[in-house]
Image: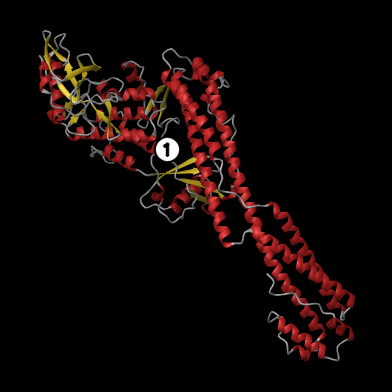
């Protein structure tokens, strides 16, 4: 059995094993102990005994244990009972047994990230740690040392949980509403601590805002490399709405009231966090964390943060513009309201918008927008502009790349001195990762468009006869009608009927009808090349292969970023190491961009051509039917010209009814019985051709 070392080199047998030291400070250290029988893990915090501790250190240590034992919150490190076998470790000073968080601290995660955390992780972290700080304040405790090193990660039920640790500097406000001691880590402490003024829980607001700014952006907001005196001198110049003060490569000081562009938050959340950070990073401690109209509400900042964390973001991919539209939803907001916003912000009128789901279904504008929310930052809807369905986004591969990428590619060497190596690499990696995400969304949008066209095609063919089936019938109908009219024209032309005006009108009318029928036959022949579009097959396999290639390039860039020693790197070495990978990434993106949009446009064009041809064939078929009726009307015109007026009254007027086969037969019988008719018309009756079959289909 392993032994526990005791003061004076004594040992005692037990099942606990000291695995490693997981943290060490000026006055104390933390070790990981594991029970070899139960596999229970504990983090044991102790004070160094190699040298005698000052009374204030011992007092602070005992105070930390006292505070920790009375706290009970999911996002604050939990105290455990010290096992009996390990109590012998207490020696002179007490020890603190805590749950072990195996995933390390926040600083470790920040060092591996570029341009801050993902949107989902920002929200997750903010929810956990703000809950911990709010809980401490309800317990009348101010932490006074909130920083990445004092935030640890633990996996619980397959989910990472962030926990606040190290309350060594915590102050119980029950002892007084204000504190005056100077404690905490300089980069994260509030300005009033520099001034050694009285402070309250609002000092934690500054620290919390600073840490959240860092996880969003990947860097600290206020001159982290400056000495305290110089830091105070420069940051003191910031205005109330400034949320960062940065030293630029040319040594100038830049004040900003906005979060940088290279972050992973969508636009609505970016704006919300900017507004919130402006209250948390106020220089005035009394106003900090509170709305100017609600200064009495000490928990206002947490109430506002809760609203941000509970906000619902609808994400729509604008296919024909190749960009992402994000909207923070109001309660019970409908799609038509979102369409009105799109019409103003994206310059696509509501009546020109087609919004489809991933399965290709067109959504109903009366539906609730919340019904289309997706998990994390996934796109749930796709927007098409009716005015530009066959348009490709204007994408100039040289002018739209940001300056830092031009530096990497060697197109802006005169800008080399404008960048710090790590920031340059981080923003380049951010850009390439953004291309990867755009590629994924582009492939999804093409798949959605293909499915939508397939649905339209199925519905269209369910209501209409298939063009391939009706083409032969239409051609045969047109051919029979044309030949019949040509026969009639030849026979009637040889008869030279009177009166000539009526005769000429009939011949001219039939000639026009014959020409139109021949044009219909020609159209049908030419439409043979227009076949139905096959929507069952798609090019997703080839698209996905190119996407995987691009994704692997980005992973290589990420590995290079995490392994690079930036203390020795220069802009030149970064440029040299990543240029080829960046060029390959851009090449894959541009190829995928071209292939996806070309395929989408080709599908749409083929479908539109097929649809239009199908409609025209239906129209041609209907026209043949109407021409048959016109042919009959010309016979009636001849009859009206030769039948006496008193006999015409026995027939139904042509303008009041459509002639039937029986009415025509009766009329011809009248003509045959009338002895006063012209001899030429008797010849017409004798040679009258068989009337077209009205039952023909």
Residue at horizontal 57%, vertical 48%?
535
Badge 1 crowding class, 10 Å Cα cut-off, few under 14, some 14 to 19, many 20 or more, is: some
Res 392 seen here: no
Q: Secondary structure at mark 1?
A: loop
Q: How is the image coloured?
A: secondary structure
Percent of width and height locating residue 617 = 67, 60
Residue 600 location, quadrant: top right
Percent of width and height locating residue 215 = 35, 28
Q: Which of the two residues, 159 or 244, is positioned nearer the viewer here?
A: 159
Residue at horizontal 68%, vertical 82%?
656
Res 28 seen here: yes
Taking 166 as reference, is 49 above or below it? above
Where's the C terminus, which quadrant? bottom right
Residue at horizontal 56%, vertical 25%?
583
Where's the N terminus, which quadrant? top left
Residue at mark 1: 266
Taking 511 as reference, is 533 above or below it? above
Percent of width and height locating residue 114 = 41, 26
Count of numbered circles on the image: 1
Instruction: Judge from the rendering whether residue 2 lies leftward or rightward of residue 328; answer left or right.
Output: left
Q: Which of the two residues, 246 or 197, is positioned nearer the viewer here?
A: 246
Instruction: Judge from the rendering whether residue 268 lies leftward or rightward of residue 10; answer left or right.
Output: right
Residue at horizontal 31%, vertical 17%?
228
Q: Which of the two residues, 15 or 100, is positioned nearer the viewer here?
A: 15
Instruction: Judge from the rendering whether residue 48 lies leftward or rightward of residue 408; answer left or right.
Output: left
Percent of width and height locating residue 187 = 31, 21
């Amino acid at each position: 059995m392993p032994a526990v070392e005791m003061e004076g080199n004594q040992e005692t047998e037990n099942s606990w094993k000291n695995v490693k030291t997981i943290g060490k400070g000026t006055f104390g250290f933390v070790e990981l102990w594991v029970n070899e029988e139960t596999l229970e893990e504990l983090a044991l915090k102790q004070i160094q005994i190699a040298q005698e501790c000052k009374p204030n250190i011992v007092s602070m240590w005992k105070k930390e244990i006292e505070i920790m034992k009375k706290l009970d919150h999911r996002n604050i490190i939990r105290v455990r009972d010290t096992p009996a076998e390990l109590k012998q470790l207490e020696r002179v000073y007490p020890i603190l047994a805590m749950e072990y968080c195996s995933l390390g601290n926040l600083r470790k995660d920040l060092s591996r990230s570029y341009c801050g955390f993902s949107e989902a992780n920002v929200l997750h972290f903010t929810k956990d740690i703000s809950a911990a700080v709010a809980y401490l304040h309800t317990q009348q405790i101010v932490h006074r040392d909130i920083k990445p090193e004092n935030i640890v990660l633990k996996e619980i039920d397959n989910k990472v949980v962030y926990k606040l640790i190290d309350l060594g500097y915590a102050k119980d406000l029950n002892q007084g509403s204000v504190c005056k001691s100077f404690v905490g880590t300089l980069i994260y402490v509030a300005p009033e601590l520099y001034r050694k003024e009285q402070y309250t829980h609002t000092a934690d607001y500054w620290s919390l805002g600073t840490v959240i700014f860092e996880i969003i952006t990947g860097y600290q907001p206020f001159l982290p490399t400056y000495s305290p005196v110089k830091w105070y001198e420069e940051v003191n110049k910031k205005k109330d709405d400034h949320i960062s003060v940065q030293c630029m490569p040319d040594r100038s000081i830049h004040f900003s009231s906005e979060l940088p562009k290279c972050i992973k938050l969508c636009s609505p959340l970016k704006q919300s966090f900017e507004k919130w950070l402006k209250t948390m990073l106020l220089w005035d401690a009394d106003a900090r964390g509170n709305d100017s109209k609600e200064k009495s509400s000490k928990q206002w900042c947490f109430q506002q943060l809760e609203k941000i964390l509970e906000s619902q973001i609808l994400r729509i991919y604008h296919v024909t513009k190749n960009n992402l539209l994000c909207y923070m939803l109001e309660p019970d907001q409908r799609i038509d309201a979102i369409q009105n916003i799109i019409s103003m912000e994206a310059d696509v009128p509501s009546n020109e918008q087609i919004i489809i789901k991933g399965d290709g279904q067109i959504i109903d504008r009366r539906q609730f927008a919340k019904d289309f929310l997706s998990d994390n930052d996934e796109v749930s809807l796709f927007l098409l502009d009716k005015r530009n369905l066959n348009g490709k986004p204007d994408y100039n591969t040289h002018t739209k790349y940001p300056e830092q990428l031009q530096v990497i590619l060697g197109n802006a060497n005169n800008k080399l001195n404008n960048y710090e190596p790590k920031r340059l690499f981080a923003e380049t990696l951010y850009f390439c990762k953004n291309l990867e995400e755009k590629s994924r969304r582009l492939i999804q949008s093409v798949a959605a468009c293909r499915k939508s066209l397939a649905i339209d095609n199925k519905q269209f063919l369910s209501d209409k006869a298939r063009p391939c089936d009706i083409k032969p019938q239409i051609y045969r109908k047109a051919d029979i009608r044309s030949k019949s009219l040509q026969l009639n024209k030849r026979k009637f032309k040889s008869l030279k009927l009177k009166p000539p005006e009526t005769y000429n009108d009939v011949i001219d009318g039939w000639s026009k009808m014959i020409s139109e029928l021949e044009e219909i036959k020609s159209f049908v022949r030419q439409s043979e090349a227009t076949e139905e579009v096959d929507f069952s097959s798609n090019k997703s396999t080839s698209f996905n292969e190119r996407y995987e290639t691009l994704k692997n390039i980005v992973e290589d860039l990420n590995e290079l970023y995490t392994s690079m020693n930036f203390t020795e790197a220069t802009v030149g070495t970064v440029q040299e190491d990543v240029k080829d990978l960046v060029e390959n990434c851009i090449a894959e993106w541009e190829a995928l961009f071209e292939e996806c949009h070309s395929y989408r446009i080709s599908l749409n064009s083929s479908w539109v051509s097929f649809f239009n041809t199908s409609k025209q064939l239906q129209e041609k078929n209907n026209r043949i039917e109407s021409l048959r009726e016109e042919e009959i009307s010309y016979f009636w015109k001849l009859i009206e010209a030769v039948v006496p007026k008193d006999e015409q009254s026995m027939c139904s007027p042509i303008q009041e009814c459509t002639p039937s086969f029986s009415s025509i037969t009766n009329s011809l019988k009248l003509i045959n019985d009338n002895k006063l008719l012209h001899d030429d018309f008797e010849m017409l009756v004798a040679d009258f051709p068989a009337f077209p079959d009205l039952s023909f289909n």
